[in-house]
Image (cartoon, rainbow, N blue to C red):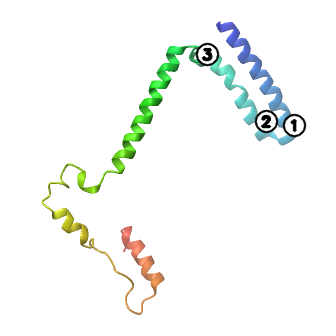
Amino acid sequence: MSDAVIFAISLGVTLVGLVISWGAYRRRGAGTGLRGAALSLVPLAAALTGVTEFFVDLAFSPVKWAGVAVAGLAVLLYLASGAMLSRRPAGTGGGKAAGDGGRGAARRGAKPKGAVEGPAQGADPEMAEIERILRDRGIS
């Protein structure tokens, strides 16, 4: 499409949007009218900056659609690899965890430092929970 046709279509869409925005301003107030006017100016701005021509070329170019498809495939493969890596068993990390001589397994069974088993005898369980939350966040 030529630049003049793209500009004429964008100008027409902008003018129709501004008329609708004027009606919204009269019925619903200044906030709605200004928002409509702002959105109505987007097609004209896109035509003046050349963004519209990019999208017109994209819509009618099989080579660009192939590029979009390849980019989509890349995103799909990346997400699939993330899902596969998150489901990997804990012992198959490859690095330090597998070669620590079993020390990691011994540590997994032990309680972490500062762990509390439960509320003390006769203590309020709700206060114990609040204290645990504060301790977890580093607030003493």
Q: Are marks 1 and 2 in contact (CB under 8 Å)?
A: yes
Residue 45: x and y in percent read 65, 21
Image quadrant containing the N terminus: top right
Residue located 33% across and 46% down the image: 85
Q: Which of marks 3 and 2 is nearer the N terminus?
A: 2
Q: Are marks 1 and 3 in contact (CB under 8 Å)?
A: no
**Rendered view: 33 above or below 96:** above
Left or right of residue 127, residue 44 in this image: right
Give the spatial CA distance, label 1 vs label 2.
8 Å
Q: Earlier in the sequence, mark 1 or mark 2?
A: 1
Left or right of residue 24, residue 93 in this image: left
Q: Report which residue position mark 1 lands on.
A: 26
Image quadrant containing the C terminus: bottom left
Q: Report which residue position mark 2 lands on.
A: 33
Q: Report which residue position mark 3 lands on.
A: 56
Camera-nearest residue between 106 and 54: 106
Residue located 75% across and 21% down the image: 13
Residue 54: x and y in percent read 57, 16
